[in-house]
Image (cartoon, rainbow, N blue to C red):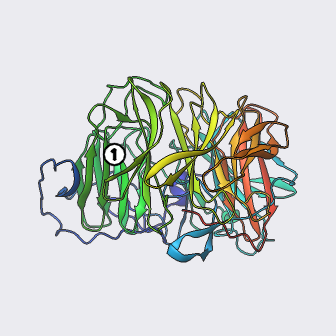
């Protein structure tokens, strides 16, 4: 019998709103007294101290997530940076060490899935207590919107929970040992915009409502609203502390339509959920932010996160742009005519090297992987490699790649689908100092400063995000095709030390 999604919610309920108390998520807001209304006007361009309007009332949520729940995102980390990072090793500046596991030589495990897989959520060591160090749990959401969770080891899998119909895009959680049934998908209510999901805070939720307002909702303490005209498919990502960043200012002035519709954001917004204040509201004049969310990561290696965006317009095309956390434009990359640039992640891909941004240029046309680096205040392309399609035109699934030490050699690889989307390549950087080297990869292809180190065959065309999670002894990655889901699990290397951002 299918298990109700609400069965995974804690027994305690409230009459106002169901709000998460998920451990590890930051942002317990200390704002105005309940019932006080604070009305604001649109701030000037750039930095802002605008305060949202405050009110009480039922937010439409139906229960409390249990304390200490582990949250699973399709984009892996709350910051939107698609890297697998160790949770217990931290370098100077607060950057976590990227996880290490040899999936390149692992035998895949195929999951028995009913229906075409569309989304994957994965859990590892944080919930798999008492296992052999390599057990993972995978929630597979199908195109029809139904979900099941599987327990996966390096040698096999078993179905654990049938969740029935779930909200998409999915936000997963595990409140206890998943093998005992404590895993589920958040039941997104009608008070949240239809093409996104809420983000858990320490004492509540942050979400976009159907009218485009950004809402901070707290347990037993009402809500704060910001009138930002947020696109209904916008994703909110964590910047740092109690600060979150997203796109507002929905507009159809750039009708490319590559990401599900012709509406994109035109405002870069940073909100502080502790103070209930809008810190940054930077509007583009004629371009748009082409993407569902920014990516928050340390791009310059100073230990502080910057904001990575893709800026597009009909006249010039798309380019990568980096902003400081205060909304100041830091640098903009080159333009190669019309088309989209798909920002995937930020990591130190070269041994002991500076952070670089991994991007697929025009994944529907050029299909070229690029690596960007901040050099003397400029955003330069330091390496390229042709042959990658990280996105399907018209899809809202932008999670088509990830980075980690994926063969336990102490170096970081980017895992990304090939042009035909039937294989995942482990791409490794070469060269240094911003000067690309030409290198021949394992498949004989040459790239400027990057090459294919190894590949993972899918035996079908990729239909899901590229998923992954960290285990106690390594990591696991997974991908789905219309025929099922394939998971690779590998043990790690004790000396892996590449920082995440």
Query: What is the x, y in percent for residue 235?
Result: 43, 46
Residue 351 lies left or right of residue 327; in this view the side is right
The residue pinned by badge 1 equals: 191
Q: Is residue 154 above or below residue 247?
A: below
Query: What is the x, y in percent for residue 433?
Result: 62, 56
Residue 354 lies left or right of residue 377; in this view the side is right
Q: Is residue 73 above or below residue 272?
A: above
Q: Quadrant of the C terminus?
A: bottom right
- Tell me, yes or no, if residue 162 can be seen here: no
Residue at x 46%, y 37% (from the top left corner): 319
Residue 66 lies left or right of residue 125; in this view the side is left
Residue 475 lies left or right of residue 362; in this view the side is right
The residue tagged with tag 1: helix, strand or loop? loop
Label 1: few (<14), some or many (≥20) within 10 Å?
some
Q: So how many labels did they put on this image?
A: 1
- Tell me, yes or no, if residue 122 can be seen here: yes
Query: Can you tell which quarter of the image residue 143 is in?
Result: top right
Front residue of this view, candidates 187 and 363? 363
């Amino acid at each position: 019998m299918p298990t109700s999604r609400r069965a995974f919610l804690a027994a305690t309920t409230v009459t106002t709103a169901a709000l998460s108390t998920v451990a590890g998520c930051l942002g317990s807001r200390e704002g105005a007294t309940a019932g006080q209304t604070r009305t604001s006007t649109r701030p000037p361009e750039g930095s802002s101290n605008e305060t949202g309007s405050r009110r009480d009332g039922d937010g439409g949520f139906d229960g409390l997530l249990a304390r200490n729940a582990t949250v699973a995102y399709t984009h892996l980390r709350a910051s939107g940076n698609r890297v697998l990072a160790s949770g217990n090793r931290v370098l100077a500046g607060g950057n976590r060490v990227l996880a290490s596991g040899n999936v390149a030589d692992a035998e895949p495990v195929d999951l028995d899935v009913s229906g075409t897989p569309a989304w994957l959520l994965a859990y590892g060591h944080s919930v798999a207590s008492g296992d052999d160090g390599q057990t993972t749990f995978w929630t597979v959401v199908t195109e029809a919107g139904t979900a099941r969770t599987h327990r996966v080891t390096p040698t096999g899998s078993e179905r654990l929970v049938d969740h029935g119909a779930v909200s998409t895009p999915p936000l997963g959680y595990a409140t206890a040992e998943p093998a005992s049934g404590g895993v589920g998908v958040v039941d997104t209510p009608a008070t949240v915009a239809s093409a996104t999901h809420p983000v858990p805070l320490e004492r509540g939720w942050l979400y976009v409502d159907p009218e485009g307002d950004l809402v901070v909702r707290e347990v037993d303490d009402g809500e704060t609203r910001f009138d930002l005209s947020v696109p209904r498919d916008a994703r909110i990502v964590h910047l740092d502390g109690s600060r979150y960043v997203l796109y507002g200012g929905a507009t159809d002035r750039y009708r490319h339509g590559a990401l599900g519709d012709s509406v994109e954001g035109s405002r870069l917004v940073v909100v502080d959920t502790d103070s209930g204040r809008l810190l940054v509201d930077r509007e583009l004049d004629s371009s748009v932010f082409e993407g569902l969310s920014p990516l928050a990561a340390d791009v310059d290696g100073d230990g502080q996160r910057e904001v990575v965006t893709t800026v597009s317009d009909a006249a010039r095309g798309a380019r990568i742009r980096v902003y400081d956390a205060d909304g100041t434009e830091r640098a903009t990359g080159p333009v190669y005519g019309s088309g989209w640039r798909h920002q995937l992640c930020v990591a130190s891909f070269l041994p002991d090297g500076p952070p670089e941004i991994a991007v697929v240029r025009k994944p529907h046309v050029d299909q070229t992987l690029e690596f960007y680096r901040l050099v003397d205040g400029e955003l330069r392309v330091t390496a390229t490699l042709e042959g990658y399609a990280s996105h399907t035109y018209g899809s809202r699934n932008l999670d088509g790649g990830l980075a980690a030490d994926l063969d336990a050699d102490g170096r970081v690889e980017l895992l990304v689908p090939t042009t035909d989307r039937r294989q995942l390549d482990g791409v490794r950087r070469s060269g240094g100092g911003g000067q690309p080297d030409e290198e021949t990869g394992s498949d004989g292809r040459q790239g400027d400063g990057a090459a294919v180190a190894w590949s993972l065959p899918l035996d079908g065309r990729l239909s899901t995000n590229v998923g992954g999670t960290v285990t106690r002894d390594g990591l696991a990655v997974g991908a789905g095709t219309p025929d099922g889901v394939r998971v690779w699990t590998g043990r790690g290397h004790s000396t892996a030390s590449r920082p995440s951002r």
